[in-house]
Every structure is written in structure tokens, then in C-alpha cells.
Amino acid sequence: MSLATTQSIAEIRARNKELIEEVLKVYPEKTAKRRAKHLNVHQAGKSDCGVKSNIKSIPGVMTIRGCAYAGSKGVVWGPIKDMVHISHGPVGCGQYSWGSRRNYYVGTTGIDSFVTLQFTSDFQEKDIVFGGDKKLIKILDEIQELFPLNNGITIQSECPIGLIGDDIEAVSRAKSKEYGGKTIVPVRCEGFRGVSQSLGHHIANDAVRDWIFDQLESDAEPKFEPTPYDVAIIGDYNIGGDAWSSRILLEEMGLRVIAQWSGDGSLAELEATPKAKLNILHCYRSMNYISRHMEEKFGIPWCEYNFFGPSKIAESLRKIAGYFDDKIKEGAERVIEKYQPLVNAVIAKYRPRLQGKTVMLYVGGLRPRHVIGAYEDLGMEVIGTGYEFGHNDDYQRTAQHYVKDSTLIYDDVNGYEFERFVEKLQPDLVGSGIKEKYVFQKMGVPFRQMHSWDYSGPYHGYDGFAIFARDMDMAVNSPVWKKTKAPWKEASGPKLLAAE
Amino acid sequence: MAQSAEHVLDHLELFRGPEYQQMLAKKKVFENPRDHAEVERIKEWTKTAEYREKNFAREALAVNPAKACQPLGAVFASVGFEGTLPFVHGSQGCVAYYRSHLSRHFKEPSSCVSSSMTEDAAVFGGLNNMIDGLANSYNMYKPKMIAVSTTCMAEVIGDDLNAFIKTSKEKGSVPADFDVPFAHTPAFVGSHVTGYDNALKGILEHFWDGKAGTAPKLERKQNGAINIIGGFDGYTVGNLREIKRILALMGIQHTILADNSEVFDTPTDGEFRMYDGGTTLEDAANAVHSKATISMQQWCTEKTLPFVAEHGQDVVSFNYPVGLSATDDFIVALSGISGKEIPEQLARERGRLVDAIADSSAHIHGKKFAIYGDPDLCYGLAAFLLELGAEPTHVLSTNGNKAWHEKMQVLLASSPFGQGCQAYPGRDLWHMRSLLFTEPVDFLIGNTYGKYLERDTGTPLIRIGFPIFDRHHHHRSPLWGYQGGLNVLVKILDKIFDEIDKKTNVLGKTDYSFDIIR
């Protein structure tokens, strides 16, 4: 079906280069020059993908990116379930990010867990003019009174906070003291900081370091007896239960998971993590900072892993086991063997339906590379990918371990470019976000949301792979895509049309 | 292992099995969990009158507010004009949020650009972002108009849209005669309905009052047409189409201002339409000549309607007219203003709604409802419930103001079914939670977030409002007109019957009442 499969690598490269040139023509000169650095065709053997990244988005182009607040409240902090996270500023930011990220957790919501509540200081004009610190003090008191079982509070700054000169750090310190050392974390994740969600991740990581780790009493009694097999899951947000379908494998191989960061996580788990023997890191982009910090400060090694698709899962289980003794290494083999029949059955069922189908991805900071193996396990081919907020180290990992020669690479792609690329490359599936979903479905292209798993999941682990395979099949092979043209209208021109 | 290729289990079932349940139980140890009895005690405490009192004494904290911020409404209004690209000046994350929010509700694309201001713009102002942004948007997306609004960042640093747009035109970002209306839409004032109002007024002002000093003001020459303003409305697709049908039936010449009923309901036929339908720019300009303007939502047009009136038009406003009397008033007003007769077909449609109410009112009569939502929607639904003989016991609007409160209380006082009912302006869904515990009702009407209240309090939720994320396609059916009234009636009845069935379906215990005819 795809044009790509019938062409040589050289032809594909030439076509992709030409496509980039064509897309750049729409821009004013200055913009074309800037955007040219973010678009490229991957060349095998190169150490990165040949694109610039983590640079300011260009005004007016319809970037898909979000902001630092989204990176901190929406990604890193929001899922910590037993803490109250205040969206500090006007009402919108908290409203739009309320419950939409599917960070699953177990708890009594509103009593001892707060993930799907929207706490906001709902700034009014007077708060902008006179400052919001007094209001914040009152808010902290009201939270203490009405939500007495909260284990801590974070203050997630929205744009105005940093512009009006509020001192949320001073408020946090004073109130923490007043409440007998309660954990209160001010986070400077104002949306105008940085170029995307990415700086918000970093700021959130630093806030854990400064306001949680640095407050720990080093001689405090551990709350549990340590074992040589204690690990922490870092950078799994438990979207649709991802961290759970990962944790179960780690425990089956004999490890003990003492903390989840941050999906279904708790303050106690954050505090316990310095006791881990190994930090295993799924989303490198959003939590490498704290992993590096723990390595430097507590001597805890960390290792990246990938639980999408059986090839990468097996590779990752062995890699993780490599940090431990034979008992764990045998455990890893046992787990791989146990799930092999499931893997075989899933591949036997779905691969014939998906073999040779082409995919274009555009996701955040991890999945543009991490899910490629899972598609390949199903016989599918990723012909284009890019990051919303990846850095060069992400593109290096992508180039060295994931993408094939001549894959189209697009960093911080915008609506216009992405539509044109899809229109020309005619993939069988696009995997991206909610803002892209309906654009491509209108064009008649099967689509799966790869942030929220399109309200499905989990996709991590062996259990998740079965769901992933089912979902990709139901997208690609839905009968509806054969019905987009009225029978009395002749099909002509390119199959998929972007907006003029 | 519960998972299999034959019967794939996803999150709905996967984690219920013993393997995952054991795993989660073991995880608890590391969570430093609160004592179970203590959690139960606090849970029960939150249901008490004592907690309600503390909850209502809150002065600073908002928990689960039922409102969004101004620019969302500005974007919603802007896309209602032909070929119009909304451009929000400020931080870019906001635009990602508006687009996601609208897409999740309508299950449609939502196109909008940002000027992507960052730290340097916070210090030096966002003029360069505006200059570059307008040029890029104009070249890439070929709009007929770019409607500019602001995020709170641009408002806090005080960027001047009028001057910035002027400068951008001088620098050649867009042609001098290209339409770039604007509105300041600070997120810390009002809500999304305020943003709708500001953006619409900004666009009308642009066309009617001389395009920011670049063209002569239009001279009004009154014709017989009527302008209709829908307001911020999750049902805009169904509602505006229904209004157009009614106007066509009556033969009334009209202009729907901010008509986004097409752009939020484009077909899947192989082509992505970034722009579709919408009020033409010519019609937007010529709307100044209309005889009158009708606003379907008073609190979405608090500034726009007086602006229209100042230009010499008659203005009439409604409060999300739903049901019999409100639709009667609307139709009579249309006829009165236009001088057109009300066709027999509308009388028949009215009769069908009366017929349906008569058939079913026994099941609704005397039932207590809690309603929350935007101020006009709350008013319209409460008025309909009163005429159905139901009691709108709690009516809560986070973005309702003092005037709304007064008007609501007058409405409630006007009906025997409104006695003891109360309107709550400025309150949020955590307040509503207390109300549902201390003064329970039979049904709750609200948006998707009401499902949390349904879970906590057991009050069955009827989904009417914005946003609705977890049910599909309801925005395509109207709530306005007699047909719309029928749709609302059916929504309410379906839930009532489902609840009766749920309460009577225990085999051998309660199923004597499990009637097949109701």
C-alpha cells in the first residue's frame, strides 16, 4: 500500500529531501532558514538525526508544543497522588489539564488522593495587581482544613507568578514550619519559561531535589527493611496503567520496586528512592535529571529501559538483570520464557494484518523512538518520526538504536508541515496527539493517540503489547477507512489531502 | 496470566485479576498509606453539615471550578468567521490547551496559533513575536482573517495589541488592508464566556467602526435582517443549525454571527478542512445594517450587545432558551421583530413537544435536580425544569455573577416548583459535592466532570454542558427550538427510566417493579 516499500533507500532519501524543500517554500525567508535546521532525512551511521532541537518555536506556525507548567504539573508532579497540587494563577491551566492525562492511581479521591481534582488559586485582577502571596497563604490553610489527609502540597506556578514578583518560596518555607515540617514544594514552572514542556520537567526534577531530597534527615530510620534487589521505576506516568504492567514483570524476575515516579506514586516513595540499588529510567527526557542527581549524590546507578514490544522488553529485562546477581538474571530469563507463548500468539494473530504497513510518529520526548520496536515486532515500518520537545541526546539515541536509513525526521513539527508530510508519504497509520488526531482522520488516515493511548492501554510490558497490537490493528484495519469517498465521486489525485 | 491474544484485556479488566491485585496490595507498604479507619472517618466527615459549613467558608481556594479562561472563548468565537485563524498572543502552552480542550469535546480538529512568547518577550515585550507570527500564519495557513486575542502573560506585561498589529502591518507581515481584529482577553478577569464576548465585540468593532482607524466607519442603513449570536455553547453545531432552520421556515433574512457550526462538524471524506463555513466577512460587516440583534445568551454578550445597541439596532437577549416557554418567547420575538408570521409547522413542532411533556411528565414531576454550568445554560435548564414540574434545587454557576444570582432567584421565586431552590454564583464543584450530601437531589445535570460527583455522592448524572469528553456526538443535536426541547426531555427521561430499572432489577427481591411498560 505504501509508496515507500517499492522504492530503494536512495530514492526514498531523494524524495524525502525534495519533500522538505517543498515544504520550506511556504515560509518567509527568515522562517524557512530556521525551520530547515529542524527537518532532515536520517543517514545510517550518523550519530544523530541531523536536526537541531530544543530551540524556541517560531511564532504563528501552529507548533504542537506546550509549556513548562504542562511539563511540571501535567507530567512530573501531577501524578503524585497523596499530595495536593495547586495550579497557582488564573483558572485555565488547571482546567485544561484536569484529569486529561490518564495517570492511573489507587486511592480515595478527595480524601487521601488528589490526582483528579483541580485545585487552583483562580487569580483575579486584584491578585495580579497586589500580588498573590496572601491568597496563597490562605489557600494552604484551607487545604489543611478541608483535606487533612494530604501528605504534602506543591505550588505549580502559572505565567503571572514569575511576572508579578510573588515570593512563593518564602510562603512555602513559612507555612511548612507552621505545619511542623510539612512538605510544601514551590515550583517555578511558569509557562513562558523555556521552549516547551521540557524545561518544566527539569524544573520539576530540581524541585524534588531541593524541596524533598535536601529536606530528608539522613539518620532517619528507613520505613522498610532494605534488600539487595530494591529498584525504583523512574519516568513512568502510569498512563492507562503502564507502570503497573511494568512493575509486575520486575517483581516476577525477583526485584522489589520501592518507588514509582510518578504514576501512582506517593511522597513516601519519592523520599524512599535514595535507598534504591538501581534506578530504572523509562522516560529519559523527563527524569534523567533526577537520575543523574541520585547517581552523583547517593551513588545510585541508573539504566534506561524500554518496555514497548517483546524485542525491547526482553533486551531491557536482561539489561536490568545485568546489574544484579544470577538469581535475578535467571529471573529475567524465566519471565521472558513465561510470556513467550503470549508474544507468539499476539504476533501470530496481528502480524499478518499489519505486515508492511507504514507508520509516521510525532510524540513528546520518548515515544518517537521507544515505540518503534513494538511496531517492528508487528512487521510495521516507521518511515517518519520527530519529537515535540526532545533534545539532541534523544536524537542521538534515535539515530543509534532505532530509526532506519532515510527515515524522515521532523523536530517541533507544526500543523502545516506534518499535514504535507503525511499527504505526500501516505502512511498507513499516524501516531500523535489529540490536536492531530482529527486532522488526519478527516484525511482518511488511520490514527492512534500516542500520548493517552487513545483512552486504551496499558501499552507497557507484555500485557500491554497485546493491547498495543489489538489497537493498531483496529485502527489500520477499521472498515471505515474504505468508506471515506462517496461511491458516486471518482477518486482522483492524492489519496490524502491536507487543507489549503 | 490473564492476558491472551484471543481475548485481549485492557485497563478496564486487566488490573482486576489476582496477580495485579496482589501486586497493588504489596505496593501499599511503600506508600506510607493513611490508616484505613482514618480515611473512612474523614470520608464520612466530608459528607456532614459541619464540613459543608467549612467548605462554604472558603475564601481563596477553588476546587474543581466549572469555568475556563477568556482566550478559550475568544478562539471559539473567532473560528465562527469565514477562513479565520485565531491567533493568541502570549505563551504557547495556552494554545495547545485550547486546541486540546475543544478537540476533546467536539471530536474535531481545532486550529489556532500562538505567538510563542518566552522569557525574552516577557522582558522586552512581544512585538517581534507579533510581527513574525502574523507573517508566518498569513503565509502558511492562507487565512481570510486573523483574529488576535491574548493570554494572561501578554496581559500582565501590558502588550498593546492595537499598536502591535499596526506596527506589524507597517513591517509588511500582512497586507495593510488584511483584517486583523483583536481583543484583550485576560484570563484573570471573568471566564471563557467573557472571552467570547470580548472577541466578538472586537471583530464587530473592527468591521463596523473603521478597522482600527484605517477605513471609514460604516454608515448604517437599516434593512430587515436579524443578527443572531449563539454565545459560547458546547452544542453550537446542533443549535445554530436548528436556529437557521427555524429562520428559514419563517423566511427571515438573517446573519448568524460567529457561526462555527460547520468548522466543528466537518465530514471525513479524505480532505481536512482547516476552515469551513462561518460568517462571511462581508456579512459580518453588513450586520451593522440589520434591524435587530438577538443574543441567545445574555452573559456571553454583556459588552457586545450594548455595542450593537449603540449602533442603533434593537437588541434582545435570552438565557439559553430551552423548552416550551423559552422557545415560545424566542419565536414570538423573531416574529415581532421581523414582522413575519409564525408558520404552522412551528406550531405543530410546539404541539409535539407539549404532547411529549404530557406523555411523560408524571415521571419528572416533583423530582429534585441540581444543575451546574455556564450562567445562561443554568438559567435555561432551570426554567425548563420548572415548567416540567421538577424542582431545580441547587443551581450553581462558577462564572455566574451577582446579576445572574438575582435573576435566577427571581425565576425560582416565580414558580411553585422553585420554592426552596437556591442559586449559587461563584461556587465550584467541591461546594456542589457538599450540597449533594447535605441536601440530596434525585439527579444532577452538568458536564463530564459531574461524573466525579456522581461517583462520590451517588447522584445520577445527566450530561448537558461543556465540556463533554466522555460521551460522543451529542453536540450535533440541538437543545434549542422545540426539537431541542424534545432532545433535552428525552435525555432526562432516559436517565430517570434507567435509574428506575437499576433500582428494580434484583431477581426475586425488587423485580416485581421491573416493569416492561413505563
Image (tube, rainbow, N blue to C red):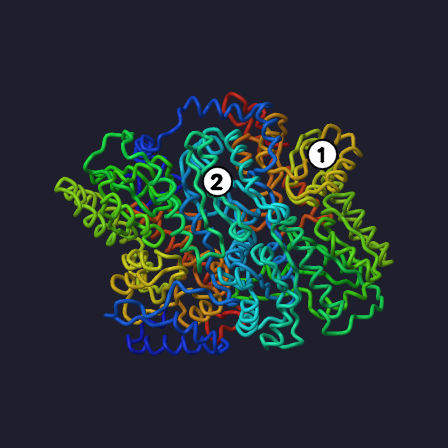
Task: Looking at the picture, tell me which residue is in the foreground, B394 or B387.
Answer: B394
Identified by mark 1, the residue type is Ser
Tag of residue A116: 2
Residue B354 on image: x %, y %: 76, 41
Judge from the rendering whether residue A492 lies leftward or rightward of residue B383; answer left or right: left
Task: Looking at the picture, tell me which residue is in the foreground, B468 or B474.
Answer: B468
Q: Chain of mark 2?
A: A
Closer to the camera: disc 1 or disc 2? 2
Marks 1 and 2: CB-CB under 8 Å?
no
Tag of residue B57: none
Residue B211 on image: x %, y %: 71, 70
Q: Give the structural element (helix, strand or loop) at label 1.
A: helix
Q: Residue at x 28, y 50 (%)?
A: A292
Q: Give the quadrant of residue A185.
A: top left
- Mark 1 packing: few (<14 Cα in 10 Å), some, or many (20+)? some
Identified by mark 2, the residue type is Thr
In space, the residues marked 1 and 2 are separated at their CA atoms by 37 Å
Q: Give the quadrant of residue B422.
A: top right
| In the depicted structure, whether residue B301 falls above or below residue A88 | below
Task: Looking at the picture, tell me which residue is in the foreground, B201 or B293.
Answer: B201
Judge from the rendering whether residue A115 lies leftward or rightward of residue B362; answer left or right: left
Q: Chain of mark 1?
A: B
**Label 1 sits on residue:** B361
| In the depicted structure, whether residue B378 falls above or below residue B121 | above
The answer to whether one can see residue B378 in this image is: yes
Residue B461 on image: x %, y %: 58, 37
Residue A51 on image: x %, y %: 35, 69
The answer to whether one can see residue B343 in this image is: no
Report the quarter where the C terminus of chain A lies. Answer: bottom right
Q: Residue at x 39, y 24 (%)?
A: B35
